Image (cartoon, rainbow, N blue to C red):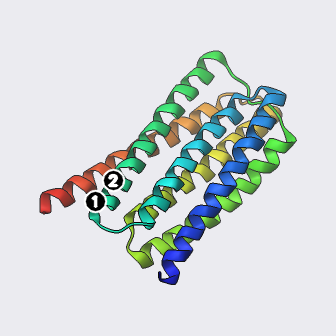
Amino acid sequence: MNSSLRTGKFLEYVTLGWNAIGVIILIIAAQGIHSIALIGFGFDTLLEIGASIIVIWELNGTGDKRQTLGLKLLSIAFFALGIYIFIQSILNLLYHTLPGKSLLGTIWLLLTIVVMIILALKKFQIGKLLNNPVLLTEGRVTLVDAALAGIVLLSMLFTSLLGWWWLDSIGGLILMGYCFWESIHIFRDLNTKSNKK
C-alpha cells in the first residue's frame, strides 16, 4: 500500500472519529437549549459519517465498479443533505425558529470549521495524487460540513446580536442549491464515462 493511499484512509478515519464525537456533543448541546439549528447540523454530521464510510470502503478495494458505486452513493448523500436542508430551512422560515445559544455548541462549531477545512484541503491534495474521484468528491462533502457549521454559528451570533432569525434559513437554501448541483454533477460525469465505454 503506497503512502498516499494510507494518508487518504487516515484522513477518512480522522473525519469519521471527529464526526462520531461531534454527534454526541451536538446531542448534549442541543438538548440543553432545544436548538433546531444544532440538531440540523447533527443530521449533517451523520451524513458526513456515512460519506466517510463509503470512501474507506472504496479505498480498501479496487476497480471501476467499486469507484462508480462509491460516487453514486456520495451523489445520493449530497441529494439527501440538500432535501434535508431545504425542509429545515423552509420550516425555520415559516415558524420563525430562533437558533438557540450554547457555549458547548459554539466551541464545537468553531473547531469543526477549522478541522473540516484542513481535512478537505488534504483530501483534495491526496485525491489528486491518487487520481481518485471518490476521495475528491468526499472532500467537497467535508467542505459543505465546514460551511454548514459556519452558517449555524453565524446565525446563532447574528440572532443574538441583531435578531436576524432568518439568516440561518437563507444560508441553508444557498447550501441546498450547492448540494443539488454536486449530486447532478456526479451523475452527469458517471453517465458521460459510461457512454464513452
Q: Residue furthest bottom?
A: 2
Determine whether 151 is above or below 71 in the image.
above
- Could you tell me how far apart the alpha carbons at marks 1 and 2 are, in whole angstroms? 6 Å
Say which residue appears at 42% left-offset and 40% top-offset.
Answer: 79
Q: Secondary structure at mark 2?
A: helix
Residue 191 is left or right of residue 9, and the answer is: left
Tag 1: Cα neighbours inside 10 Å, few (<14), some, or many (≥20)?
A: few
Residue 159 is left or right of residue 42, and the answer is: right
Q: Position of residue 74 (x, y in %)?
A: 42, 50
Say which residue appears at 52% left-offset and 26% top-offset.
Answer: 87
Residue under circle 2?
A: 69
Say which residue appears at 56% left-offset and 37% top-offset.
Answer: 172
Q: Position of residue 111 (x, y in %)?
A: 75, 56
Residue contact at pointers 1 and 2, CB within 8 angstroms? yes
Whether residue 162 is visible to the viewer of this picture, yes or no, is no
Residue under circle 1?
A: 65
Amino acid at dot 1: Lys
Determine whether 1 is above or below 63 in the image.
below
**Between 37 and 46, which is closer to the camera in this rendering?**
46
Tag 2: Cα neighbours inside 10 Å, few (<14), some, or many (≥20)?
A: some
Q: Quadrant of the C terminus?
A: bottom left
Say which residue appears at 77% left-offset and 25% top-offset.
Answer: 34
**Between 135 and 2, which is closer to the camera in this rendering?**
2
Amino acid at dot 2: Leu
Q: Position of residue 9 (x, y in %)?
A: 54, 68
Determine whether 129 is above or below 179 in the image.
below
